[in-house]
Image (spheres, helix red, strand yellow):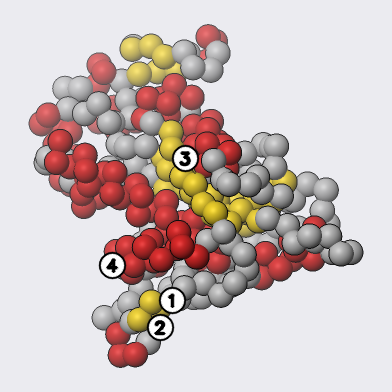
Amino acid sequence: MSDYKDESDPGDPGDPGMLPGLEVESVHAASPPEPGRIAGYAIEEELCAALGGGGRPVPRIAGVDEVGRGAWAGPVVVCAAVTDLSPPPELPGRGGRTISLTDSKLLTPAYREGFAELLPGWLAGHAIGAASPAEIDELGMTAALRRAAMRALESLPEPPDVVILDGGHDFLRGPWRVRCEIKADQRSVTVAAASVLAKVHRDRLMAALDGEFPGYGFADAAGYPSPVHQKALEERGPTPHHRMSWSYLDDLPRWRHLKKHRDPAAGEGQLSLL
């Protein structure tokens, strides 16, 4: 049995990004790394060379990752993490093997929890930001994701000099310098740490909601689509924690009238029931 877990990662496609003002192009992996690949500091080292040369201080680099983008219920959660570029913590695995920090989706739940206990004491700083289902309905996912990321970045002990975003699209749009990297959570220790903390934080939130709204599978599927979730929606309808502008409601005739629609002519933030 593997110490690592391979899961799908729903996300939005985007344009390749480049760090503004630097001659450091975004590097897109030609193929996904193998499960269990150790995240390193290659991206961070490139940024340090570009920003911290000539006797200047080593830049503060924040890795940013999100979880919950493709869920039907619950918030979208973003973690911003800053390391001091020291070796990250490791966990003991089966048969004397060592489990290294990597993308949260490649780790079993037990190892995610293990790293989540160690990372706060190792990181130079980290913060969590979230956008609620109501904000997602009001703003749309991209704007809600940006709001959650801004909350996380603005809550760091010190503002970062540059941000590594997991993915090919810069949804932040300033004020920070941004480096977009596809599969950064498998290639950057800083982003890997953010991915683990964001995932564990959101999973715990959704597990707590399971006690309040049993039967939707929140503890097992964290608000993502599943047969249990679909059945509960058909029978009981959405909870206050569901995203009410999403297309899953189109497939629920009994509850379709509850769907919220943004009116493009009325500007961002205008919702109506049609």
Of residues 209 and 1, the one drawn nearer to the viewer in this rendering = 209
Q: Are marks 3 and 1 in contact (CB under 8 Å)?
A: no
Quadrant showing the N terminus: bottom left
Quadrant showing the C terminus: top left
Mark sitting earlier along the chain (3/2): 2
Residue 14 place in picture, x, y as percent: 59, 45
Give the amino acid at mark 1: Glu
Give the amino acid at mark 2: Thr
- Residue 250, image quadrant: top left
Can residue 31 be seen here? The reply is no
Give the residue number, with chain letter if any, for mark 2.
Answer: 98
Residue 194 place in picture, x, y as percent: 49, 56
The dot on residue 110 is 4
* Residue at (75, 61) in percent of width and height: 58
Residue 149 place in picture, x, y as percent: 53, 40
Q: Secondary structure at mark 4?
A: helix
Mark sitting earlier along the chain (4/1): 1
User: 51 above or below 243?
Assistant: below
Mark sitting earlier along the chain (2/4): 2
Give the residue number, with chain letter if any, for mark 3.
Answer: 129
* Residue at (53, 33) in percent of width and height: 147
The dot on residue 146 is none
Q: Are marks 2 and 1 in contact (CB under 8 Å)?
A: yes
